[in-house]
């Protein structure tokens, strides 16, 4: 099997400060946690920004630049910036940070969908910040908007104009067909780095049968023109990423996807999860790719061509 890429999603826009004291919020915390994750074996760091005062998801480009600089100075990990941001953001807001930073890589969501976080709100009686409970509850009546026009805009502004490559986030089988549509139109070039996303309420369920099916459809649509990776929400994180590694795929962990390291035990850092999955994949005989090797595998433009 080829070398395995470990992606670490450092903070995201899903979990809130009440859920864990270990969620990095300030640029300094995000940078420090990302650097530790890279030293633990993360090849790619998937990055969001947070309001440093209260942990609310933020689209402020200045916050992105505050953590990207220290990360770039301290390690060689590939910075993969979100273009999904948060479902409450407009597309212009979601693109503000990536447009300024001009990264090697961005995430790209392949379809509009329900994105239900509201069940989590029932688990807590007290909240650290006022915004948290309404933020979660409001997803009961919210669409995470990613239209064909939105996707085309991201291809144009981040891909053609700034040379970024994409982590294509596919939350269901139909998203694979959407990706094939854009590939057939010649708007994107292989190799396609496809992230199968499991366990989000509104997307495909987190079980191995669905993973095998997603891979089967991707094989049919893209042949040898793609690499796949797997992320799974919450308690499904380690079982599904382990299954991905056995199938020759790549893996994603991080506090964006799960705040736990084991049943009922909070991860104290992103590095905890990276170290755990690294131990698992190496025990399976997979060798972790270096950032330089991953840049070659994914056809990235190189860190010297970014704006940080």
Image: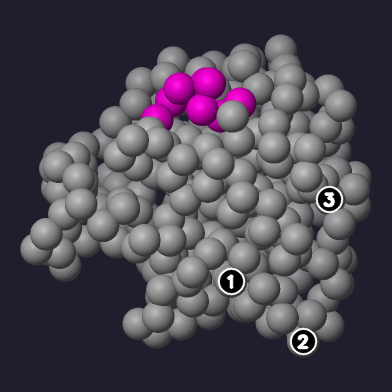
Of the image marks 2 and 3, the number of the one nearer the N terminus: 2
What is the CA distance from the residue labelled 2 to the residue labelled 3?
Answer: 21 Å
**Mark earlier in primary sequence (1, 2):** 1
Question: Quick one: SS at disc 2?
Answer: helix
Q: Which residue is mark 2?
A: 283
Verify CB contact (< 8 Å) between mark 1 and mark 2: no
Q: Residue at x 52, y 21 (%)?
A: 61
Q: Is residue 60 magenta?
A: yes
Q: Which residue is mark 3?
A: 291
Percent across and percent down for residue 26 are: 46, 40
Residue 59, numbered label: none
Picture quadrant where residue 41 is located: bottom right
- In front: label 1 or label 3: 1
**Crowd class of label 2 (few under 14; some 14 to 19; many from 20; radius 10 Å):** few
- Residue range in magenta is 57-65
Mark 3 Cα shell of 10 Å, populated few (<14), some (14-19), many (≥20) = many
Query: Is residue 75 visible in the rendered structure shown here?
Result: yes
Figure check: 82 above or below 154: below
Image location of residue 116, percent across then percent down = 25, 51
Residue in the image at 20% along x and 52% along y: 128
């Amino acid at each position: 099997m080829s070398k395995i890429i470990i992606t670490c999603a450092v903070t995201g826009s899903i979990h809130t400060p009440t859920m864990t004291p270990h969620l990095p919020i300030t640029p300094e915390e995000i940078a420090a946690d990302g650097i530790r994750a890279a030293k633990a074996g993360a090849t790619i760091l998937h990055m969001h920004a947070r309001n440093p005062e209260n942990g609310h998801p933020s689209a402020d480009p200045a916050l992105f630049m505050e953590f990207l600089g220290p990360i770039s100075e301290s390690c060689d990990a590939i910075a993969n910036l979100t273009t999904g941001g948060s479902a409450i953001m407009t597309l212009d807001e979601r693109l503000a940070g990536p447009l300024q930073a001009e990264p090697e890589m961005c995430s790209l969501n392949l379809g509009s969908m329900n994105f239900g976080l509201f069940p989590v709100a029932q688990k807590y009686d007290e909240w650290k910040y006022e915004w948290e409970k309404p933020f979660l509850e409001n997803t009961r009546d919210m669409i995470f908007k990613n239209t064909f026009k939105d996707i085309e805009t991201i291809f144009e502004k981040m891909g053609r104009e700034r040379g970024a490559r994409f982590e294509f986030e596919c939350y269901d089988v139909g998203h694979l067909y959407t990706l094939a549509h854009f590939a057939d139109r010649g708007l994107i070039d292989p190799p396609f780095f496809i992230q199968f996303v499991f366990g989000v309420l509104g997307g495909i369920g987190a079980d191995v049968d669905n993973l095998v099916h997603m891979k089967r459809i991707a094989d049919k649509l893209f042949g040898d023109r793609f690499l796949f990776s797997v992320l799974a929400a919450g308690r499904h994180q380690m079982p599904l990423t382990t299954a991905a590694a056995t199938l020759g795929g790549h893996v994603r962990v991080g506090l964006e996807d799960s705040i736990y390291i084991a049943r009922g035990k909070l991860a104290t850092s992103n590095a905890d999860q990276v170290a755990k999955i690294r131990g698992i994949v190496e025990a399976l005989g997979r060798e972790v790719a270096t950032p330089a090797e991953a840049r070659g595998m994914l056809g990235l433009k190189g860190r010297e061509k970014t704006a940080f």
